[in-house]
Amino acid sequence: MAHSNALRTESAAPIATPTTVRASRVRWRIFAIVFALTVINLIDRVSLSIAMPTIAGEFQLTPSLQGLILSSFFWAYALLQIPGGWLIDRYGPRRVISWSTGLWGAFQTLAAFATGGASLLLARVALGAAEAPLFPSGGKLNSLWLAPSERSRGAVLMDCGSPVGIALGGLIIAYLIAVLGSWRIAFFVAGIVTLAMTGLAWYYLRDDPARHPGVNERELDKINAGRATSAAAAAKVPVKGLGIARRSLAGILLGRASWAMVFFGLLTWGPSYLANARGFDIKGIGAATFVIFISGALGSICGGFLCDTLIRKGMRRGLAAKGLLSVSGIVALVAFMLLPTLQDPHAAVALLAMTAFFLMWGSLYWSFPALLAAPSRVGLVGGVMNMAGSVGGIAVPILVGVILQYFGGYGGVLGFFALCSGVFILGTLLIALDPIKERENHA
């Protein structure tokens, strides 16, 4: 009888089947690494903006020349977006990201040895060239590693690294300059940290989820949910042209460029605005920059998760995404119009922090290449989109410098940012996201 009970007990025990095995979460670890790279990317990028008040005095730079140097990063960065996107589609994001990280770490380190405006400008051009493929690579990984229902979250997890990097960079670079009395040491330390990330990127990233040793069948099913073919197979299907509707491409380019004018305007000239118009010292600039851009990071995450939640609850994707992006632009437009009326510098920082929270809903743009473009053109379309943003990044530091030098004061600058916010809304409304079910089935 005891033996019989034992047999019944054993037979009643649940048998492990593929359906009871929990899905691995490698895809989110992939995006955690991309997030970390983005943070470091922006720390390296913002270091010059934080140090510019100090560097301008050492090198005797005029406002126009400061604007030229601040914009120089984007010259090669913009020119290499399309070639970088082609390389990503051709060789895969893992290889391109690893090379990119190593090169930009080297050039950030070399910037510490600049002897004047010309050598600093050259170092920034080289840094821009090396950093160019990172965001399009992230867009490609979004296509390869995430199902359509997860792409808004993937996009913002990548892009929210930008304001986090700016926030941390503002604190770290300002602190190093204040404590060590040297912007050069700050640049050198930032470059060495970047070089250390190269090995991690190569070790863990993969272009095909099926080839990653940590991915199990359940996670692979989640990644391929809603696809007619697997992510890797779909990415190899040949397509003519860019594989995206012209109207949507025009909207993406216009919207991204105008959004970038606002974002990179705050990035490049924000510290000088805080110093010259609001009276903050170097530590105050670092603290205010942290508050503003960490608010942007929180806004980016909230925007992506809110968008996916609205879609899961039955809202059309076009209404959800374009509605959130339009609110983002409206808040920024109103905030820049109100900012000149505020006398309290801390109230101004609070308003800028609120603006950054909503402005970073613009991270949703990084879900568009994977959603709208043919799988074999996602990297290229991401590069084209980022090139438009880079053109905005080139123009805005120069334009702000000219406005300051020839018109005086920051009132005109804030009015210009309000105008850019309006154009951002217009570009967003041009993008056609409904219906996209057929496109998702082939993505």
Image (cartoon, rainbow, N blue to C red):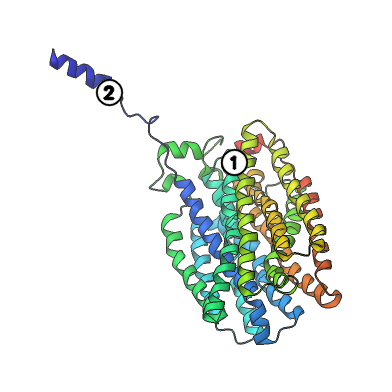
Give the camera-side residue of 189 and 252. Answer: 189
Q: Mark 1 highlights which residue?
A: 443
* Image quarter (top left, top right, bottom left or bottom right) of the C terminus: top right
Label 2: how many residues lie within 10 Å, few (<14), some (14-19) or many (20+)?
few
Please say if 132 is above or below 92: below
Name the residue type under label 1. Answer: Ala
What residue is drawn where x is 66% and y is 47%? 368
Q: What secondary structure is marked by label 1?
A: loop
Say left or right for 123 vs 33: right
Image spot of residue 432 (x, y percent): 74, 42
Q: Are marks 2 and 1 in contact (CB under 8 Å)?
A: no
Specify the quadrant of the image occupied by residue 423. bottom right
From this viewpoint, which residue is outermost toward the right? 407
Residue 263 visible within the image: yes
Q: Which mark is residue 317?
A: none
What residue is drawn where x is 40% and y is 40%? 216
Image spot of residue 401 (x, y percent): 77, 74
Label tally: 2
The mark that comes first in sequence, 2 or 1, is 2
From this viewpoint, which residue is outermost toward the front? 344
Please say if 56 is above or below 147: below
Image spot of residue 60 (x, y percent): 70, 87
Specify the quadrant of the image occupied by residue 382. bottom right
Give the camera-side residue of 82 and 98. Answer: 98
Name the residue type under label 2. Answer: Ala
Residue 85 visible within the image: no
Image spot of residue 100 (x, y percent): 53, 66
Q: Mark 2 highlights which residue?
A: 13
Give the foreground label among 2 and 1: 2
